[in-house]
Image (tube, rainbow, N blue to C red):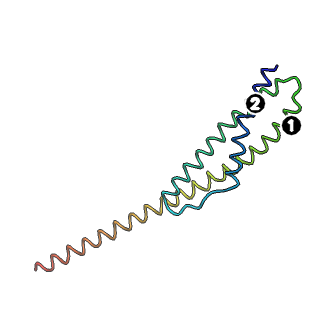
Amino acid sequence: SSGINAEYRTGIKEFTPWLVGAEKAAGEGLAKPADLAEVTVLNEKVLSFEKNCVNYLKVLVAAEAAANKMTTHTEADNEMTALKARYDAVKGTSDTWVKKVDVLFKEWTLLDNTVTELNSWVAKDKSSEGENQFSLEKM
């Protein structure tokens, strides 16, 4: 059973530092992007944060499974309950971020495309004017 206890401890040791870092990041929030490039970086950041949440949940679940095999696991149960509550808070923030940034990403992409279209439209308009002037001069 000491092997099981070690397995539980190892899991907690791996999970806790990640959780502390994730809580810090969640507390700091997100910087407001100013352009499409920044939104793209932000989108990658939140998706990677989300992926880590999913991966570290596996670590927590494995630690819990090990804890449940221990003869006396009241202390472990209490620890697990506390860690799960903290995890849920971080995961909640992550879910909100993913949704928010997804909307921002779509809005910025749309805006960027619109600006690009307007610019090419203006450029086309200028060139056709130029051609008109040219052909008028020839007459």
Nearest the viewer among 104 and 19 is: 19
Count neighbours of disc 2 (C-alpha within 10 A) and say few if under 14, some if 14 to 19, many if 20 or more: many
Amino acid type, callout 2: Ala
Q: Which residue is mark 1?
A: 78
Identify the residue position indicated by label 2 in the image: 63
Q: Earlier in the sequence, mark 1 or mark 2?
A: 2
Residue placed at 66% from the left, 53% from the top? Answer: 96
81 shown above or below 125: above
Q: Residue at x 70, y 33 (%)?
A: 59
Quadrant of the image occupied by residue 87: top right
**In this rendering, position of residue 38 left or right of residue 12:** left
Name above or below for residue 136 compared with residue 80. Answer: below
- Tell me if residue 72 comes above or below residue 47 in the rendering: above
94 or 45, nearer to the observer: 45
The percent coordinates of residue 13 (x first, y second) are 73, 34
Secondary structure beneath dot 2 equals helix
Q: Position of residue 51 (x, y in %)?
A: 61, 41
Image-based side of 99 in relation to 34, left or right: right
Q: CA–CA distance between discs 1 and 2?
A: 13 Å
Relative to 36, 62 lies left or right:
right
Residue appearing at x 29%, y 68% in the figure: 124
Quarter of the picture containing the C terminus is bottom left
Q: Secondary structure at mark 1?
A: helix
